[in-house]
């Protein structure tokens, strides 16, 4: 679970969430040794050493399918700090990962994903208008041989689409062209 101090800070951060649903919004970078230690303690030892010092606040009122391909050579993580229970949905992998306070999700930033209410398969903007926002701390783990081994990453060539920031992703369904 996040520390009491982090939960207190999150209250003022959550109030800055834009009203516009559907997108993940950055609310600024920060460094915090106590949060770094808490998060590092949840990671495999080799990966904890590769956890970058800088974090970023992210908030959304649900988020349509997208990727974060601008994060190269890292695994991306989202630590849920505040908000209602949601899920991070990965349609190509057919995975749904809970995103409740205290949950940590680590993933390939190139993989299409969305932040949806539990059980939802599609993003529908009207569902999230006026919804309580989710607040995450985004973090990065350097992707090197130790992280690849610790997370069991298969580096075999992909037979699917070559994902990049220029590949259009259907925001409702996560489908690729």
Image (spheres, grey):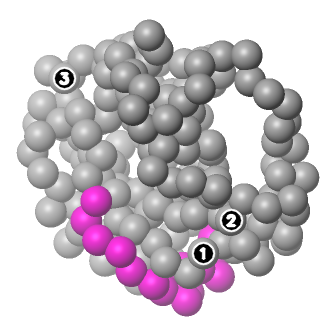
Q: How many marks?
A: 3
**Which mark is on residue 29?**
none
- Residue 63 makes an appearance in the image: yes
Give the percent coordinates (x, y) of residue 48: 75, 72
Q: Earlier in the sequence, mark 3 or mark 1?
A: 1
Provide the residue designation for mark 2. Answer: 142
Q: Is residue 133 left or right of residue 144?
A: left
Instruction: Report whether 166 appears left or right of 12.
Output: right
**Disc 3 + disc 1, Cβ < 8 Å:** no
Instruction: Let me know if residue 42 appears in the view.
Output: no
Q: Which residue is mark 3?
A: 125
Tags 1 and 2 in contact by the CB under 8 Å rule? yes
Quadrant of the rendering where the C terminus is positioned: top left
Does residue 137 lie above or below 80 as drawn? below
Can you say whether 93 is above or below 39 in the image?
A: above
Residue at the image point whose x is 46% and y is 72% from the top:
55
């Amino acid at each position: 679970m996040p520390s009491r101090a982090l939960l207190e800070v999150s209250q003022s951060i959550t109030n800055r969430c834009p009203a516009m649903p559907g997108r993940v919004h950055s609310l600024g970078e920060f460094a915090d040794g106590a949060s770094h230690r808490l998060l590092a303690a949840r990671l495999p030892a080799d990966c904890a050493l590769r956890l970058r010092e800088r974090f970023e606040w992210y908030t959304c009122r649900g988020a349509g399918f997208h990727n974060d391909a601008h994060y190269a050579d890292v695994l991306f993580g989202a630590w849920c700090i505040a908000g209602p229970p949601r899920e991070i949905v990965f349609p190509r992998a057919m995975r749904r990962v809970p995103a409740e306070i205290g949950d940590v999700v680590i993933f390939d930033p190139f993989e299409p994903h969305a932040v949806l209410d539990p059980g939802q398969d599609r993003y529908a903007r009207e569902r999230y208008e006026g919804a309580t926002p989710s607040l995450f701390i985004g973090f990065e783990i350097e992707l090197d041989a130790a992280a690849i081994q610790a997370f069991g990453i298969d580096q075999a060539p992909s037979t699917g689409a070559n994902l990049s920031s220029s590949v259009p992703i259907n925001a409702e369904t996560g489908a690729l062209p």
